[in-house]
Image: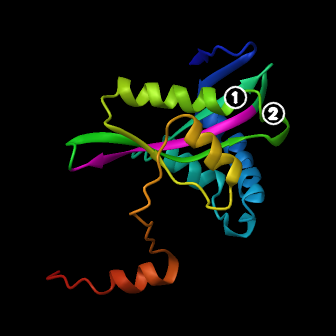
Amino acid sequence: MKIKTRIPDYVLCDTTEADVPLILAFIHELAEYEKLADEVVASEDVLRESLFGDRRVAEVLLGYYQGEPVSFAVFFHNFSTFLGQPGIYLEDIYVKPQMRGKGLGKSMLAYLARLALTRNCGRFEWSVLDWNESALKFYRSVGAIPMDEWTVQRLEADPLEAFAKEFDSEE
């Protein structure tokens, strides 16, 4: 589905399986920008299963300017026990460097905020790298507030496997 924006020649599009190679290319481009290229292990097969398989765990929105792909966003639903409502968590948003400053990212973010309201979500959240001053400034300009009293915690790879072994089961 194509979604018109206020920006001439810029449309947002829901994705299909045919978009998986483009999505992976955007992931690699984002990782390069964030200086995390060596951490990308996603493959087309993994993305196809995660985004379009029997248990879809995330959604992707693509942005096209004059017919060319220039932006993407990956998001999924979470749940706030305090609100008793779902939320949308924005995992990644990326606009090609040469297209920045035209309002494309803001338009995509505003669409996701509207989608959150349409889906009866109580929150729209994301994380940002603390060195990304331009992103932090932009997010403040749209009214986002930092959650200073919270820190992200993560288990992955070997520590995740090791901790999972701590669960004693009667199986």
Q: Is residue 162 left or right of residue 106?
A: left
Q: Secondary structure at mark 1?
A: helix
Above or below, comparing residue 3 to residue 111 in the picture: above
Q: Which mark sits nearer the N-terminus, 2 or 1?
A: 2
- Label 1 packing within 10 angstroms: few (<14), some (14-19), many (20+): many
Task: Determine whether label 2 and label 1 are within 8 Å by CB.
Answer: yes
Q: Is residue 93 visible?
A: yes
Task: Name the quadrant containing residue 166.
Answer: bottom left
Which residue is painted at 55% across and 34% down in the image? 142
Which residue is painted at 20% across and 49% down in the image? 82
- In this figure, which residue is indicated by the disc labeled 2? 99
Q: Secondary structure at mark 2?
A: helix
Q: Is residue 53 visible?
A: no
Q: Amino acid at mark 1?
A: Leu
Residue 8 location in percent, x, y? 74, 12
- Point out the image quarter for the N terminus: top right
Q: Nearer the viewer, residue 159 or 115?
A: 115
Above or below, comparing residue 153 to residue 121 in the picture: below
- The segment highlighted magenta reads 70-81
Above or below, comparing residue 35 to residue 2 in the picture: below
Asked whether 50 falls inside the magenta stretch, the response is no
Mark carried by residue 104: 1
Q: Nearer the viewer, residue 28 or 114?
A: 114
Residue 120 location in percent, x, y? 30, 29
- Point out the image quarter for the C terminus: bottom left
Residue 35 location in percent, x, y? 75, 64
Mark carried by residue 85: none
Above or below, comparing residue 146 to residue 21 in the picture: below
